[in-house]
Each structure stands twice: as structure tokens, then as C-alpha cells.
Amino acid sequence: MGKNIDVKNEGKKRKWIYPRKVKGKLSRYRDLFGGLLLLFLFSAPFVKMNGEQLVLLNVIERKFAFFGILFSPQDFYLFVLAMLILIVFIALFTVVYGRVWCGWACPQTIFMELVFRRIERWIEGDAPRQRKLNESDWNLEKVWKRGLKHFIFIAISFAISNVFLAYIIGSDALFKIITEPVSSHVTGFIAIWIFTAVFYLVFAYVREIVCTVICPYGRLQGVLLDRNSMIVAYDYQRGEPRGKIRKKAAVEAVPPAGDCIDCDMCVQVCPTGIDIRQGTQLECINCTLCIDACDAIMHKIGRPERLIGFKSEEELVSGKPFNAGRRAYMYAAVLVAMIIGFGFMIYRKPNLDVSILRAKGTLYQTLENGDIGNLYNAELVNKTNKKMVFHLIPADAAYRIDYIVKDSVLQAGEATKLTFFIKHKEKGLGGYKTNVDIKVVVDGKERNTVSTTFIGPVNF
Ligand code: SF4
Ligand code: SF4
């Protein structure tokens, strides 16, 4: 059992983990990358591009926006395709680079490691002091440290909850909930506090269990990884047989046969509490912290770095350089094909959807003046973030439109429904069923032409 695990909890199901702080090149890169991701996560719902949120994931109204492109409910298939591309991308990434997404880019890890654990260390100290505080009886120091920590945790969870809602309902709707009286937005207000409670529980108590037990992606690892996948791995050929260093002056000491001096540092820094020397484990999130920890030890004892490194099983066994493997190339081909298809669909995505259908179950009507009329329902969807002023004109001047329900303004991202008669003189109809083309004129310019059918008496 690792020393960053609470012995007091042994026998119980949960083992509280106190990972040590680690310094190193990879940790610095990860902090930088994570910091940029945090900046993006917190700003994306509040930055506008083409009048839309940079990222909007309004699953309730099925409205999505990515980098200025708005996807209305009619474009839901595009959103589904984008999600499929993301899944294939993550699968490909996992096949080649293992679970590096979890350790470097997953919001759960980023918030846990870069925000919550950092605050915990700042208030309670590094792992040994945290353990000591936990094991101590309640006193003034414990009360104020715990109180301050949980107060800050709740405040940050509240901020995350607001940002999360801004992704789901939009930053404008969130702003209304914040600025208007609670009584006008009871549901929104309750949602903010429910999400606050969930985030607080996740980051204060559930922690690594999200990665090791709850997250389905972690469970998929066993299926996706193969001998060629790059993973955080211990070079057992080089490290074994392990043994404690024999002399007090570490730098001059001669290590035992293997390079591993069994210092346990790789275990002490692990946020999921595992010993990477036992081989690939589902709990490993590829955070690479144990690489930095072991590199520091190797440096001290004058041995080459990367006893623990980012390597494939094949590389460890045969010493052959990294080769992605056939499966990775297959995934890559599928991914490229999907991205090309998606790009083409985005390029062809219409800004305005128009459907005109003859009213269900109706035939033609002979009007008082002897003209023939057909009843129609039309729906127009504005898929842009700009208002549209529109009207419909039959391409053939022999037809005319008489509205029952009329509209001429389409707000950004909105849809409207119209009901109208198309009329034609009894004389001159081409037959029982003829095609009618309707031009859609938007802001003075002809945008679409939609075809529908017109029926009249059989004898014409
Ligand atoms: S940090 Fe390196 S040397 Fe120390 S126990 Fe882990 S693998 Fe062995
Ligand atoms: S074994 Fe290493 S890479 Fe895996 S979770 Fe633990 S510290 Fe991170």
C-alpha cells in the first residue's frame, strides 16, 4: 500500500489519498496547459463570436454554438456527428497515447489538481501535514483550517456551477437569473445550488473515485489499449531487482542491481494512490506525476532519467522504438473521413430552412369569385444570429398568396409558422396537380425557391 494512503482507513472501503507535491518538467507543462484550459473553460460561455457564445451546449432547446457557428434543433444531426468525431478522436488518442486525456485535459483532473488540491496544500500544507491534521483531534487550528478550506471549496463550486449553467442555458439567461429577483427564476436558482452541491461533493470528497470507478471512459481503457499504446510505464527490465540505497550520501551510493531504489516517491505523488511498478492499471490516469518524481530521484542518485516514462509495452519488452500500430492507422483514416464529411456539411449548411406543405387532409377549394385555392402551412427557421425580414412570392405571377397567419420578421436563431392560401384562376391550371415554385425573399434578396404542389378540379 502506498504511503499517500490513509492507514487509518484501512479495512474501510475508502482510502483517503494524500498525494505529495511534485516538481518537474512535465508538471510545469501540465500546469501551463491546464491553466490555459481553465482560462478557456471559464471564458468560453462569456465570449461572443458572430453574436453567439463561443461555446453553447443548450441541450434543453437543442441549440448549440461553436466558435460562431450556430446549430439549431434542425442541425441536431451535425451536433451528433461532431460528438461522434470527438469520441473517435478520443479513442484514437487513447489507442496511441493511452489515457493522457484524463491526466492532462479532463476538467475533473484540471479542477482537482490545479485548483482544489492546490488550495488544500496552501491551507493545510503538503501530504504529511494534511495527514497529521486529519488524524489530530479537533482544535482551533483544525477548525479554522478546515472551515476556510471548505468555505473556499463551496465558493469555487458556486463559480463552476454558474459557468456550467452558462454553457447549458446561455450566459444571457444566466445573467438574468443573477440580476433579477429570485422569485422570477426559482428553477434556475435551485439549479445553481444543486450543481454547486454536486461540484463541492465531487471535489471535496469523491475526488479520484470519479476517475477510478465512475467514469466510463476509464473503464474502456482495457479495450482500447494494446501493446503499442504509449502509457506511463515502469521500466521493470531496468528497475528490477529493486532495493534500498545502501549508503547515506545518495549521490555517491551504488544502487543495487536494478535502478529502482524503492524510495516510494512514485507512489507518494500518485493522485489515485497506485504503484505504477505493478504494471498498467485502470486507476492510472496518465498524469505523468510519477515520471517527474522518479526523474528527480534518478537525478539524485546519478542514474539516467525515465525509469518511469511514457513508453509502450512493446518498447519496454523489445526495446524497439515507438510504432503506432495498425489499429491506430485505421482509426486515423476513419477520423479523417469523418472530419472531411463534417466540414463539407458545415460548408453546405443552409442559413435558412423553409418548408411549405399543403395543409394535411385538404383538397382544393372553389372560392366565391370562382378561383381555386389551396391551403398551406409553412415553417421558416433562421439559423443565423441576425434578424431576417422576409416575404414569399410565387415564381409564376398567375398564382397569388393570401395570408391567414402572416409574419415577416425572423429573429436570430428563431422559427416562425405561416398559414396561407395560394390561389389561381380556374382557367389556365395545368391539370389536377401542378407544381408551384415559391421564392423566399430575405432582406430584399431572393434566397430560396421552394416547390410545392397545387391541386384543382380534375377536368382542368
Ligand atoms: S520513484 Fe523511481 S526509484 Fe523510487 S520507487 Fe518509484 S520507481 Fe523506484
Ligand atoms: S501511476 Fe503515475 S501517471 Fe498513473 S495516476 Fe499515478 S502518478 Fe499519475
Image (spheres, grey):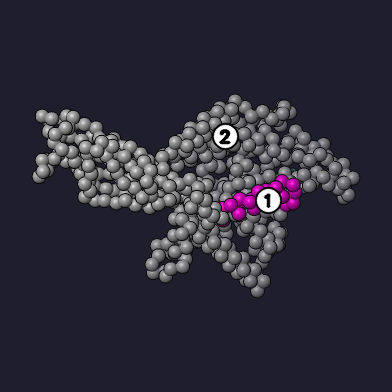
Q: Position of residue 167 (x, y in %)?
A: 49, 53
Query: Where residue 235 appears, x then y in whole percent?
Result: 73, 36
N-terminal-most mark, 1 or 2? 1
Residue for point 55% across, 42% down: 218
Question: On residue 61, which mark appears?
Answer: none
How crowded is the residue under tag 1: few (<14 C-alpha within 10 Å), some, or many (20+)? few
Q: Main secondary structure of the magenta part?
A: helix
Q: Name the side, left or right, on which 436 lies relative to 21.
A: left
Q: Which residue is tagged 2?
A: 92
Q: Secondary structure at mark 1?
A: helix
Q: Residues within 10 Å of mark 2 (few under 14, many from 20)?
A: many
Q: Position of residue 12 (x, y in %)?
A: 57, 54
Q: Which residues are magenta?
A: 22-42
Closer to the camera in the image, 460 or 60: 460
Q: Quadrant of residue 360?
A: top left
Q: Residue at x 21, y 37 (%)?
A: 398
Badge 2 marks a residue whose secondary structure is helix
Q: Amino acid at mark 2?
A: Leu
Q: Which residue is mark 1?
A: 32
Taking 409 as reference, is 338 above or below it? above
Q: Residue at x 10, y 43 (%)?
A: 369
Q: Is residue 316 left or right of residue 332?
A: right
Residue 331 visible in the displayed image: no
Which residue is at 64% across, 55% downward?
114
